[in-house]
Image (cartoon, rainbow, N blue to C red):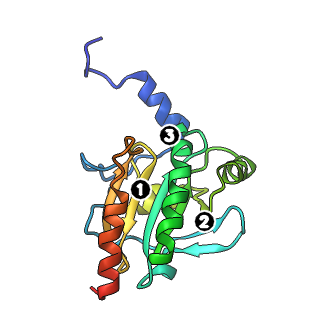
Amino acid sequence: MRFGSRIPPVFLLILFAAGLAFSPVPASADSAMRLKVGEKAPDFRLRDVMTGKTVTLSEFAGKHVVMLEFWATWCDICKREMPNLVKLHAAWKPKGFELLSIVLPSGNVNDIRKIVREKKLTYPVLLDSDLAVATKLYGLAGPIPLKVVIDHKGVIRYSHVGDFPPGEDEMPFVLEDLVKEMGKGK
């Protein structure tokens, strides 16, 4: 088989295992989602797997910078970066930041709860049981974890696929700028 002549079977197996449906609109080359930086983030309503409370994106409008973290229970990179996300959330929450974890259906709820307890997650973990938020609203069509940062006006300002190499996490710089903007009422 020539390189690039066919989609490798391993890639197809990974997509199948993830249970992700492709969006009818192709993702851009620099993102794993259909939506682009500068577009309005679609509102959603999901339940927190630990509290049962319904959370909407719109409840943070005008008050918080929000990061959505799309992940799944089978994703080792996702689980490996969780301690850093807990630290990020603790450091920036008092400044007007909220992290919303959106878990794709990839196991039962007890598996998700076990990870939440083991990793000591301090932010809402929302189950996207039918992938409506991930694939229909945000057009997730690529790898995870996917981070989407939304400013206080509800506009997507940053996205990043995967984890950050050690010492190269740019998230604090992104948040610093957006929190400053929020304070200035921009």
The one of 19 and 127 positioned closer to us in this rendering: 127
Q: Which mark is residue 147?
A: 1
Earlier in the chain: of badge 2 and badge 3, it is 3
Determine which residue is flagged by label 3. Answer: 77
Is residue 19 among what the camera can see?
A: no
Q: CA distance from mark 2 to mark 1?
A: 15 Å
Note whether 145 is above or below 49 in the view shown: above
Q: Position of residue 183 (x, y in %)?
A: 34, 85
Left or right, 130 with reference to 162: right
Residue 86: quadrant of the picture: bottom right
Determine which residue is flagged by label 2. Answer: 124
Note whether 77 is above or below 60 in the view shown: above
Q: CA distance from mark 1 to mark 3?
A: 13 Å
Q: Position of residue 122 (x, y in %)?
A: 62, 63
Q: Give the residue at x 39% y 56%.
A: 139
Q: Give the residue at x 34% y 26%.
A: 7
Q: Mark 3: which secondary structure? A: helix
Is residue 65 among what the camera can see?
A: yes
Q: Give the residue at x 56% y 51%.
A: 83
Q: Position of residue 105 (x, y in %)?
A: 61, 49
Q: Residues within 10 Å of mark 3 (few under 14, many from 20)?
A: some
Instruction: Tell me the quarter of the image containing the N terminus.
Output: top left
The one of 19 and 63 positioned closer to us in this rendering: 63
